[in-house]
Amino acid sequence: MHNQENFQENLKMLCEQVGTVSEMCRRIGVNRQQFNKYLAGTHQPSKSNLRSIANFFGLSNDVLFSNPNDFRSMIEGGHFHLFRNLIQTPKMLMFVNELLQANNSNLGELTGVYERYHHSSIYKGKIVRSVFCIYEKNGMLMHYYIERFPNQDGSGKIDYHFKYHGLTFLISSRIFCVDFESIQKNEITFTNLAAVSRNSRKFVFGVSSGIAATMVRQPVATKVAMHFVTKGLMKKEHIRRATVLSPDDPSIPKEVVDYLGAGTSSIDPV
């Protein structure tokens, strides 16, 4: 059953992302006075209007009724407009159509929350466990992930964190990701992955590389392993597990430890 209060809050959030509500209503084809009632929570949109609103923002109907905190984590970031505009361009639509026609795989099989592991370029000898979420928007896969770095004094306090938003492409059974760091807004990363099922548990293995806009932060390339957690969007309990770990931490899956390997985990800059 859909939560109307969630929809009301999420719709207000989306309105923050557009120029004017009047122009948006015109493009969606929804009466402005009727739309105001949706924002006020006094009326629910018809199935047709709900579909029109979802299509305008490139979202599925169900996502519009998500928990507002989870929804904000998905859409916020300085590059939301970039991705929404990018996937609506004619050349991108042609590219996506080619991918969909050439690929018989179900995009939904990849969606959900993953725990993402790689050796840290900041805390030498440590493993970063971030939280990575793949979701579907208007026939395309998109993702976002969060890294949290605790203070090294053992207090558990988070010194800083990064959030990445991006596009995901499935090509010839390979998963390609490109994303932007949306807090400092100065880094782009690229990831090439392949999904593997082992012992009824889903893993994704590959290589990720990134470079910042300034050379203050050195470029890095590293092996990446992701362990599937659950379907749906990222929740607070998932984010709390994002941290930095010792390589022998028992919470790291054995398959991840085996893949990352000792001494062959990353490509360091010369």
Image (cartoon, rainbow, N blue to C red):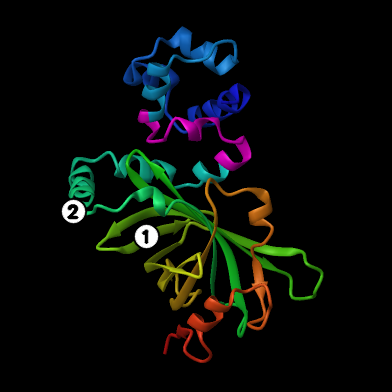
Q: Nearer the viewer, residue 160 or 172?
A: 172
Q: Amino acid at mark 1?
A: Val
- Camera sees residue 121: no
Residue 73 among magenta residues:
no
Alpha carbon distance from label 1 to label 2 = 20 Å
Q: State left or right for residue 85 relative to residue 202.
A: left
Residue 28: image location, x then y, percent: 35, 20
Residue 107: image location, x then y, percent: 35, 50
- Camera sees residue 158: yes
| Residue located 50% across and 74% down the image | 217
Vertical comparison of 117 with 230: above or below: below
Vertical comparison of 14 with 142: above or below: above
Q: Nearer the viewer, residue 232 or 241?
A: 232
Residue 169 falls in image quadrant = bottom left
As drawn, the label of residue 220 is: none
Vertical comparison of 212 with 112: above or below: below
| Residue located 52% across and 26% down the image | 11
Q: Nearer the viewer, residue 235 or 157?
A: 235
Residue 56 among magenta residues:
yes
- Of marks 1 and 2, the one in the foreground: 2
Residue 25 falls in image quadrant = top left
Q: Residue furthest toward the front?
A: 199
Q: Amino acid at mark 2?
A: Ala
Task: Please give the residue where the numbered disc 1 appears in the rendered image.
Answer: 178
Residue 7 falls in image quadrant = top right
Residue 154: image location, x then y, percent: 80, 74
Q: What is the crowding at mark 2: few (fewer than 14 residues within 10 Å), some, or many (at least 20)?
A: few
Please give the range of residues in magenta. 55-71
Q: Nearer the viewer, residue 150 or 129?
A: 129
Residue 41: image location, x then y, percent: 59, 15
Task: Please give the residue where the numbered disc 2 appears in the rendered image.
Answer: 102
Image quadrant for the C terminus?
A: bottom left
